Image: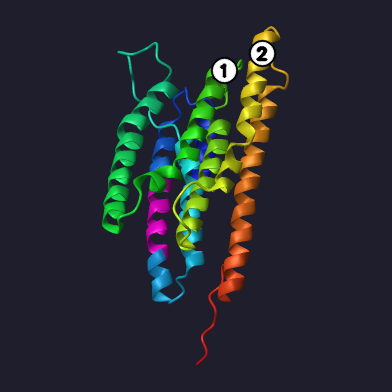
Amino acid sequence: MFLVVSALLGYIYSSHLDTAPPRWVHLAHGLLLFLYQTFDAVDGKQARRTSSSSPLGELFDHGAEWWAQDFRKSIPLLSWVPLPFIPDIPLYIIVMILMILFAVIPTIGSNVSNVQKVVEARKGSMVLALAMLLPFIALLTGVAVWSYLSPSDIMRNQPHLLVIGTGFAFGYLVGRMILAHLCDEPKGLKTGMCMSLVFLPFAIANALTAKINAGIPLVDELLVLFLYCAYTVGLYLHLAVSVVHEIKDALGIYCFRITRKEA
């Protein structure tokens, strides 16, 4: 909820991530992010204190964290920083480059290194261990191609919607990975993960129609973007609800309620 409020503030005061919002908005972003991280850190302690930790809680916790990532990414980060030395580069491009250089690449490198250590310790296959990353790569590639071909420049004009839709697709992929880990499934690519990619061929094909139709796509891209968000949100919620019901029924526990212990 804290990050949702923060993202809404970002959308209201910088809908295209290219204008500087009031300074108090940045203070609110920092405060809300601090509250989010604080409550995210104490929920596990509370679960252990009440002896209510479970695989369902682990799945819900990690799933909620990844669900929140797309809202965190929709917060304008550098819109208040003067950048006179690179005036011709759009702000959102600068933000993306900095995120890739200082967040994405180091995180990927660290994660691959950790996976390699575990694989070597268990004498497993590094190829199978990393196979589940292919849908993530395909998702990023598809969104990048769509943004590049977009006749209405969706990355510039509708960055919040694109980030939210892609964020929920990421959340779905992460949820499938966590589920595979909890169920101790064999390592390798899961076909169900590809459901998050189903919409992108249509979006890319629609953008390509603008090339042969005087720059006008077959379907309005704003509508396509809304449909993309609706599809990924629905896909994520379907996974979350179905898995929560199956786990709580299998373990005989409740969702959002601690089972009373007999005296």
Residue 184 vertical placement versus 262 (above, below): above
Q: Left of 3 or right of it: where is 225? A: right
| Residue topped by disc 2 | 210
Q: Residues within 10 Å of mark 1 (few under 14, many from 20)?
A: many
Check disc 2 and report its element: helix, strand or loop: helix
Residue 118 visible in this rendered orientation of the protein: yes
Q: Which mark is residue 77?
A: none
Report the span colored magenta.
32-43
State the residue lying farthest toward the top: 214
Seen in the image, is 122 located left or right of residue 48? left
Residue underneath mark 1: 149
Report the amino acid beneath label 1: Leu
Q: Is residue 207 above or below residue 45?
A: above
Badge 2 local density, few (<14 within 10 Å), some, or many (20+)? some
Query: SS class of the residue under badge 1?
Result: helix
Closer-to-camera residue (27/11):
11
Task: Name the quadrant containing residue 250.
Answer: bottom right
Amino acid at pointer 2 = Ala
Q: Position of residue 112 (x, y in %)?
A: 32, 44
Q: Is residue 220 left or right of residue 34?
A: right
129 or 50: nearer the viewer: 129
Which residue corresponds to the image point at 59% horizontal and 56% vertical from the top-left? 240
On screen, residue 46 above or below 229 = below
The reply to whether dot 1 and dot 2 touch (C-beta < 8 Å) is yes
Residue drawn at 40 percent across, 15 percent down = 89
The main secondary structure of the magenta stretch is helix
165 in relation to 51, above or below: above
> How far across and down, in percent of the image, does residue 56 sit?
51, 65
Residue 33 counted in the magenta span: yes
What residue is rendered at 44% in x and 43% in y? 131
